[in-house]
Image (cartoon, helix red, strand yellow):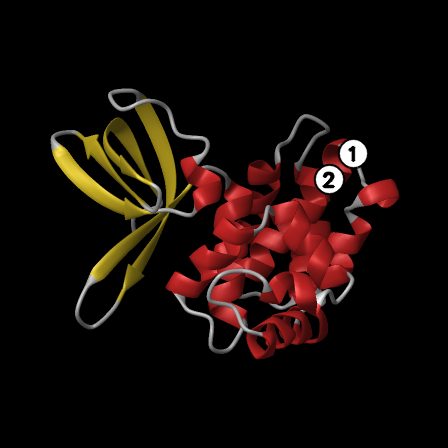
Amino acid sequence: MITFVEGILEEVLPNTVVVNAGGIGYQILIPLSSYNKLPSIGGRVRMLTHHHVREDAQVLYGFSSTEERDLFRLLIAHVSGVGPKLALAFLSGMSIEEFKGAVVTSDITAISKISGVGKKTAERVVLELKDKLGVAAEWEAASRENAPTGIDRHLHDAVLALISLGYKQVDAHKAVKAVLTRISAESSAEDVLRESLKHLLT
């Protein structure tokens, strides 16, 4: 499993980059949200990746942040009918905060305006993320006037990352609570996620 690629940015298109990592050119498909954050060609770049294996190909999808990759994985793992190509369309058509807000408020119209996403798909996204996973409740708790700060925000982010990896919401919460004694106020969301995964896998 390839989790990130770091190297020199060789080629750039709005939906594809080529990164030279140790003399190997990795072609990586990206959303527009990541394209807007790329350095100039010849610059050094670190892309977080999702390694998607099909019967006829192995494809790398790249992201500039863990939040983008988590949302991508959440969509392809838990929304029926949404594959990698359509998940990239979601990230390209809306900012992460706009998408979260649309799911929380059941704004089908806004989601269906994304290129390649019809009303039925938008309805399915809202239904499956809200009802099957409780993701919208997590997003609502972590947004606007209720936004947690510091370590509390990292705990929310770790729960959502675990859900995006396929864990049930209740199990994700239990795992994060179980590792509270192992983390400090300086711990990052990645630290919390790492400890929570250790707990779940032991």
Asked if the residue under mark 1 is in contact with the one under mark 2, i.e. CB atoms within 8 Å, the reply is yes
> Quick one: 1 or 42, which is closer to the camera?
42
State the count of labels. 2
Which structural element holds mark 2?
Answer: helix
Which structural element holds mark 1?
Answer: loop
| The quarter of the displayed image where residue 46 is located | top left
> Quick one: 167 or 34, which is closer to the camera?
34
Q: Give coordinates of residue 187: x percent, y percent.
A: 64, 31
Name the residue that disc number 1 marks. 149
Q: Residue at x 17, y 70 (%)?
A: 56
Q: Give coordinates of residue 86: x percent, y percent.
A: 44, 64
Please indicate, yes or no, whether residue 118 appears anywhere in the rendered image: yes
Q: Residue at x 30, y 31 (%)?
A: 6
Q: Give coordinates of residue 78: x percent, y percent.
A: 54, 71
**Distance CA(mark 2)–CA(mark 1):** 5 Å
| Identity, as a three-letter code, of the amino acid under mark 1 | Thr
Name the residue that disc number 2 marks. 153
